[in-house]
Image (cartoon, grey):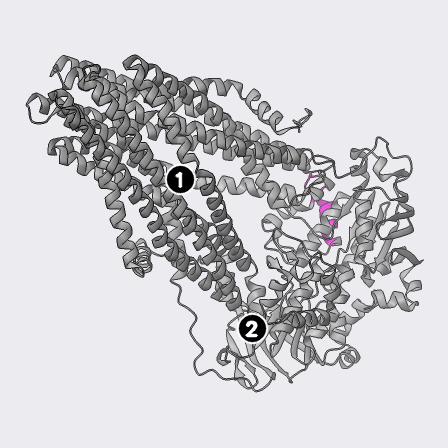
Amino acid sequence: MTGALLPISTAREATALARRLLGQRPWVVAGCAAMFAVEGMAGLVAPFMLGRIVDVVVDGGSASAITIAVLWIVGAAIVGGLATFLSVALLARTAEPALADLRETVVERALELEATQLESSGSGDLLSRVGDDVRLVTESFTEVIPLLVNSVVAVVFTAVGLFALDWRLGIAGLGAVPFYVLALRWYLPRSGPYYRREREANGERAEALLTGIHASRTLRAYGIAGRHQELTTAASWRSAQLAIDVFRLQTRFYGRNNRAELIGLLLILGTGFALVDADQVTVGAVTAAALLFHRLFNPVGAIVGLFDEVQSVGASLVRLVGVAQLPPPVPVHDPQRPADGHLVVRGLHHEYVEGRPAVDEVSLDVAPGHRVAVVGASGAGKTTLGAAIAGRLAPTRGTVLLGEVPLARVDGSGRQPVAIVSQEVHVFAGSVRDNLTLAAPSASDADLSSALAAVGAWASVQALPDGLATMVGDGALTLTPALAQQLALARVLLADPHVVVLDEATAEAGSAGARSLELAALAVSADRTSVTIAHRLTQAVTADEIVVMDAGRVVERGSHDELVAAGGRYAELWAAWSSG
Amino acid sequence: MTNQPHPATPGGLVRRTLRRQRRGLAGAIAFITLWQVCEAAVPVLIGVVIDHAVATGDVERLLLWGVVLCVHFTVLSLAYRFGSRIGFRAGQEESHLLRTEVSAHVLSPRGARLDRLPGDVLAVATGDADMVAEVIDQVVYTVAGIAGLLVSAVVLATIDPFIAVVVLVGVPLVLVCTQVLAPRLAHRAHERQEAIGRATGLATDLVRGLRPLKGIGGERTAHDRYRRQSREAMGASIAAARWEGLLYGVTHTLSVAFLAVVALVAGKRALDGDLTIGELVAVVGLAQFVAEPMGMIAYLVAKLARSRASARRIVGLLAAPPLVEVGSSAATGPAGLTFESVSEGSLRAVSIEVGPGETVAIVAEDPSDAGSLMHLLRGEGTPTAGRVLVAGVPLTELTIEESQRLLVVAEHHVDLFEGTLHSNIDPASRIDEARFGAVLAASAAVDLPDDPVTVNGMTLSGGQRQRLGLARALAADPPVLVLHDPTTAVDAVTEQRIAEGIDDVRRADGATLVVTSSPALLARADRVVHLVDGEVVAVGTHAELATGEAYRAAVLR
């Protein structure tokens, strides 16, 4: 199903974009960095002063020396606390606006995607980018990144601290680094595939559970509920087993971290022993070094533990940047306003697969305000023709003119040229009002109610719990298919385009709803050029012209009476339809 | 599917979790406690090495304590490895059991009357099941944390009782002070989550509806909406970060200041000769360490509340009553379907009779009439007056096995499953090749591509899905079959073929009820029942009824 996926940026492009976004607020970034530095330095004071106290005790110094050292620690506690507060707050002020810019650009580009591009990459890819990826990056910026930055700061300043105590102690501390690196190099290549498999298994598990919930009636009716339960159990255990395997791997990784901790500690104590023995450093300095290093266990553990998460944030980020970097749509060159709703299709030809035309040299001429009905069996090319007229599809060749202006040159800033409603119904999550104002942001409630009345839905909307303010769509009230499609048709009235294409806009509503939808469709095409694609021939009877398609070609055209009298393909369809 | 009753209370559910994972629980507690004690001992050991080796310059001691440190780290590492693995496995097993219990309840033969949206049920089966299973970890780490605290207290008390009191009173005080801020932070963090969730939800919803959205040129308005939500999420994140920073800052200041107090007391004692250097290091190290188990316990107590809330949701879902009403009778008569002056919902005294080998069609002009009919036929309710009889027995008095054997209701909405064309049409593999071919032909589905079917049949068109659903209903070949609007998404010629096909397949001895307004189907029915405003206004053949104006208006379009 999925052809070419949407682009993914390189790490370099992602970094460049991040730098550009962050660069918009240089002073906040600088302030944030400064606060992290203060925090790191303040963190060194306590171990240093504890070492000083040890020295005071070893040398039999004065009690006031201990008090002074303690006061230093208290001072550092206050400065460090303040710096911590400011660094976290400033980090948010740095990162959050940049993040908001990024996700808004991503959604903007996503909404601008050409329909053809969307078809070829499948909506799943885009959906997971504007959904899961944005969420992952956003949440990690508020949870993971501060922890990571803090840990890195702690590690860097501890290393600095070790070197400040004595360069040899510093080198001893660095001796642990190769072992941490080894642990990571052992772990990361092994964990990556596991995580991917675990995500897939979780996806399958969710799919199995959801199918069971959605389709429980069908599963029970056909006696396959028990089998589906077995399937669900198997999927659930597969994902549990993978989680257990991943965890086993993690614990082996933690064991390797413990090894690195031990080696570092032994190196520092051993080096300290030798240095004290040679009178190069004091016992207090060795104590401070050991305490500094011990204090590092948690931040280092956090960094290596976060490596997975950082990797997956990185993977999401390049997917987001890939979308953000898509070129914005090219503005129309020399835009022109169509004079009227005169629709002309000339020699339209489209091949999805080369050599197999879906629409084969079709021409139409629809006078302003007229209604054309396109009929024919499934696969006759009706939908492709509708998509080309609506500008959703760049045809292999041929032109579509609106009011003498080629569709691609129509000035988009004015009245919308062509609207299309298909049988694909979507109720947008939000209020009924939100659903309608998508087409006309400035419409008043009076406009909305008259549009709803025109499509015969005003009474139904008034009957909803909160009328226009009723929350509908995903996670809220589910509307009947008929009412959902009436909302879609009301949107067309509000958008008030020159031309409307109705592609099976009345199918799937069930027999009881179909008639009210047909009336709504008529209301939408009143005083407007319209192309109606229909299975139900009722919609054809009253059309100004009927176009019968077969295998991509127009095989007949004329009024209902003419075509019935001609006794051709349409007459055959009509006989089947009306005889019953 | 378990026969055991589900726990009735959240506490009961949590207790059952602990009971059935008791072996894993015990093993994990043993190892994790050992690990905690080892962690507590690390600063003590550092102090010992400094005291006995670094300060004295004794090489043998250095080597000896170096070996001890190695052994210690090995024990620490292995104890965590095995303890956490045992606990994790128990947790995974438990959440798996809870998840399958929820799923089994939803899929139980009589169904479950759920008052939640599907996504919500999924969240209960995944997130809430995981959260309840976390109780195991919570118990393990709380016990281990307490053990770590006790060991620290004992060590501190042996070094210096006064310092032990300072540490064991001071640390909880520091924790309590920082906890004052925690609820406010939790509140802000919750707001941030909500705002991010709203923004993400809006974006995915817009992309799902992208084609209809582009159809009316609503992209700009949609993006403006998203921008507003995104800015709201940004504001909430910055506000939450401020509180987070405040909490971290205060925690940092208090814990370091407390360390200063301990250092002051211990330093002076060491100066007086009451403490050795090693003991001084151990005291300072332990003072830092005890904050960990204490913080952990406070965190776990907070999480226990969340686990209980999840347990409440699971218990509530498992308590959902069955959807289908059943009795204990078996069929007594020939397999027909009878409505005996039934009133229910919008229906008023409706009588319909479908005998074996007969096909009866119902024209219901009002969707709520069709809705009431389907509600009764699914066995999800009994009529307020009259009876719905299947094979001579009220539908809701049949056993579930009997009603499933006798009656299949094919819904207008067709659910498809991942698999093949064949596995969707004949899911229980009951029919042979010849019958399969006949069913395909009858549903005008011979031309359907034999490609893998994806979940919900996403790759199929509406008409293809509908024909597949019809083929499945015909393949099931029940004595009584109900079809709800089986041909709304197919063209007139195909509809005609389907009408003939249904007739061929069902004519022998099946009783068939079709709710439809398609003339092609109506013309093939033995009788047509015309329902208006919940009442039967006419019964007869399509040709007979077609002379009436109201009927013509309803079906001849």
How far is mark 2 from mark 1, CA to CA?
A: 43 Å
Q: Amino acid at mark 2?
A: Ala
The answer to if A513 sits in the magenta stretch is no
Classify residue B277 as left or right of residue B105: left
Residue A567 lies in quadrant: bottom right
Say which chain tag 2 marks. Answer: A
Where does the image place residue B476, in percent across and percent down from the top left? Answer: 75, 43
Q: Is residue A421 above or below residue B500?
A: below
Say which chain tag 1 marks. Answer: A
Q: Is residue B420 above or below residue A484?
A: above
Q: Which residue is mark 1?
A: A193
Where does the image place residue A275, in percent across and percent down from the top left? Answer: 9, 25
Which quadrant: the N terminus of chain B? top right
Q: Which residues are magenta?
A: B426-441
SS of the residue under disc 1: helix
Q: Residue at x 43, y 17 (%)?
A: B30
Where does the image place residue B251, in percent across and percent down from the top left? Answer: 35, 36
Count all numbered tags in the image, as a single digit: 2
Where does the image place residue B270, in percent across and percent down from the top left? Answer: 20, 18
Classify residue A73 as left or right of residue B415: left
Residue A236 lies in quadrant: top right
Q: Earlier in the sequence, mark 2 or mark 1?
A: 1
Q: Which residue is mark 2?
A: A388
